Image: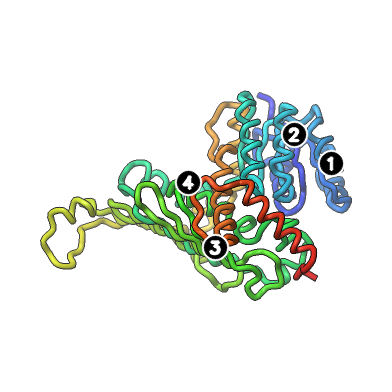
Amino acid sequence: MAKLRYGIIGIGKMGHSHAKKINNGMDKNAVLTAVADTSEERRSWAEKNLKNVKIFSNAEDLISCSEVDAVIIATPHYFHPEYAIKALNAGKHVLSEKPAGVYTKAVKELNEVAKEKKDLVFGIMYNQRTDPMYREAKRIIESGELGKIKRINWVITNWYRPQAYYDQGGWRGTWEGEGGGVLINQCPHQLDLFQWLGGMPSKVYGFAKVGVERNINVENDVTFYTEYEGGGSGVFVTSTHDFPGTNRLEISGDGGQIIVEWKGLLSEKFTFIKLKTKESEFNATNKRFMPLIPNTKRTKRISTLSNAIKMGVIGQHINIIRNFSKAVLFGESLIAPGLEGINGLTLSNAVYLSSWKGKEIVLPINEDEFIKELEKRKEEEKVSNKKV
């Protein structure tokens, strides 16, 4: 069977990586036929390193290329919905880098187009959905073993970024260039997993601190609280100025607790503590003061390179591309459907809006109010840009 012919729009950091992997044959069902970038330097790199690949200076020419079946969008965030809509309307399958966009109103428009194009595949690069630890957590939750979720907490402060990181590109650390900071740049995967595992909340209360110990215009220190229709709650804490930081996810339910913790390369650990009797049932009959509920404990670890590769902890991006290729060619189910990209973005938009307005946000958010507040910060940035 013929291979899926990919075109990549944007060959910066992530697009560059995707191009090399596909061009080197890491997906047996794919071939790279075109790339596009506005940067002459990046196009020169493509000419030297990507053989038999068409090179364009703009996205529109690549999208209209007859030798492209599917488009990977790896541009700055604001362009994701725009180019995805253009590609879908041109009859191309679309795999978008995260986040789906900067604000939900644009992504909602994209999703409507995608729903109309029923013969086209639309995916998003939520590669951490391939991580076996999170997949096991998802399996346990869906099986009912964890019971009703009471609480989901994630502390992920191991995104350390020094000032030099923000200084390397004019678009980094700006509202105009990125549309935000740690929430829109580093955390889209975790925001996706937060709702993929715990569900979408009904209320969000967020605190996003701008430029903590960094000369940037956007947030790099965030804490937000969530409430759910079923009575559960959640807390999410993230930053880019802590070192060494923490990466620990805890999900507590009526039937036990799931913990996923990452302490460094090849040190990911999964723990499931399963109660032999659900807490609600135990509490209904227990007569003892401060008892322990009988339980079993199961753990999984990533400790070797070979095991990490085998389990899919390493090579997650190409695993999403392989899955996308099979979805187009053979009808395989997508690991990360593009329509779901709006969920994690809704969380970040709600946190921003809550922090800006100093109030609790009930979902769905007021999209026009969010855009108004975002534009206000972009205008303020033009007058008092800390990145000089």
Q: Residue at x 67, y 35 (%)?
A: 94
Residue 27 coordinates in the image, percent (x, y): 65, 39
| For residue 43, above or below residue 324 | below
Q: Quadrant of residue 214?
A: bottom right
Say which mark, if any, is on residue 358.
Answer: 3
**Residue at the disc numbered 4:** 196
**Residue at the disc numbered 1:** 58
- Relative to residue 261, is residue 384 drawn left or right? right
First-in-chain label (2 vs 1): 1
As measured in the structure, the alpha-carbon distance from the residue carrying label 1 to the one carrying label 4 is 34 Å
Q: Is 148 in front, or is 330? A: 148
- As helix, strand or loop, the secondary structure at mark 3 comes to loop
**Badge 4 local density, few (<14 within 10 Å), some, or many (20+)?**
some
Mark 1 or 3, which is nearer the eye? Answer: 3
- As helix, strand or loop, the secondary structure at mark 2 comes to helix
Amino acid at the residue labelled 2: Lys
Q: Quadrant of residue 318?
A: top right
**Residue at the disc numbered 2:** 86
First-in-chain label (4 vs 3): 4
Q: Quadrant of the N terminus?
A: top right
Q: Is residue 269 shown to the viewer in this render?
A: no
Amino acid at the residue labelled 3: Gly
**Badge 2 local density, few (<14 within 10 Å), some, or many (20+)?**
some
